Image (spheres, rainbow, N blue to C red):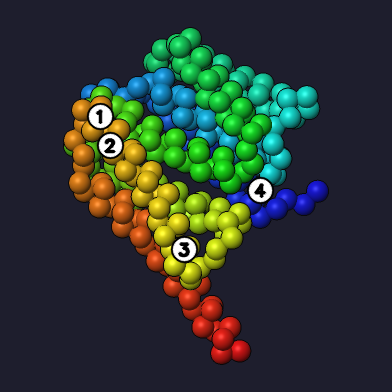
Amino acid sequence: MALSRRQKVTLISLVFYWPTFFILAHIPIPLLVRRAGVSDKGLHFLAYLVLVFLFWFAISGDKKVNWRRGGVWLVFFAVTGYGVVDELLQGCVGRNCDVGDMVANLAGTLAGLILFSVFTFWPVALLVAGTVIFGVTNIARENLAELIPVTFAIFHLFAYAIFSILWICYIHLFLSFKPPKFKWLMAALAVPIGLLLTVKLSSLVLGKVLGLREVIISVVAIAAVVAVTYLIALFHKTQDKRL
């Protein structure tokens, strides 16, 4: 059976993500990460949430999880089995084999599959992207913007741009209004900006600095994606009128 374009993109993402994930899991933990007080369990949860998301939708298309079918159990045992082997192998590179990490891996995998049993690809993609943005921003006890300013700024740029693209795709597929209408423009901006406000307000509640530079970078990323999409739609509309 031929793969859809979205499946191909998801599969390519999985091919790049999984080896990168494996390499990062088998190198000594950088001193900077230790200084930041990053939650190891939180990282494991997020990493396996993304892994099972890419794995499931690469092989299933847009199908929801059906727990009575064999496919979901194949994915479950493949990802959790990898999580166990991955943790055992870490002892070979000077890292600790931690049962708590295995539990976090399992939790991320199960959380993903439960989400996939309720929602299809696009809603889940938004939820996973939002969870990763929220988690990475607030996963450390220290302020990452001060410890790794360039990396953290780049993360904000790409993370909010990707989330905005996913949200615009969702609007295009499931909501009635299309660009370049004003309602579309407001909707395209509302959810990414809402996520940014939620993440940053949560950071303040957790006692972290707001990080004005990261806020500005995130807003620029959101605005750039929305503006480019809007201008492209406006251009096509003008061309259609001429024809």
Q: Given the image, on which type of amino acid does mark 1 rest?
A: Val
Where, by quadrant of the figure, is residue 77 drawn? Answer: top right
Check disc 4 and report its element: helix, strand or loop.
helix
Check disc 1 and report its element: helix, strand or loop.
helix
Q: Is residue 218 above or below residue 64?
A: below
Screen quadrant of the C terminus: bottom right
Pick the front one: 156 or 18: 156
Mark nearer the viewer, 2 or 4: 2
Q: Residue at x 21, y 42 (%)?
A: 211
> In the drawing, what numbered circle is on residue 183?
3
Pick the front one: 149 or 215: 215
Q: Which residue is labeled 2 in the image?
A: 201
If you read the primary sequence from the N terminus, does the residue marked by circle 3 or circle 2 appear first? 3
Q: Given the image, on which type of amino acid does mark 2 rest?
A: Leu
Q: Position of residue 88 (x, y in %)?
A: 52, 14
Q: Position of residue 228 (x, y in %)?
A: 42, 67
Q: Given the image, on which type of amino acid does mark 4 rest?
A: Gln
Estimate how packed mark 4 is, as few (under 14), some (14 to 19) or many (20 or more) residues with alpha carbons within 10 Å.
some
Q: Which residue is labeled 4 in the image?
A: 7
Q: Is residue 122 left or right of residue 70?
A: left
Mark nearer the viewer, 4 or 3: 3
- Residues at badges 1 and 2 in contact (C-beta under 8 Å)? yes
Q: Position of residue 125 (x, y in %)?
A: 54, 43
Q: Which residue is labeled 1 in the image?
A: 205
Q: Tell me the distance, in whole angstroms, between the alpha carbons under discs 1 and 2.
A: 6 Å
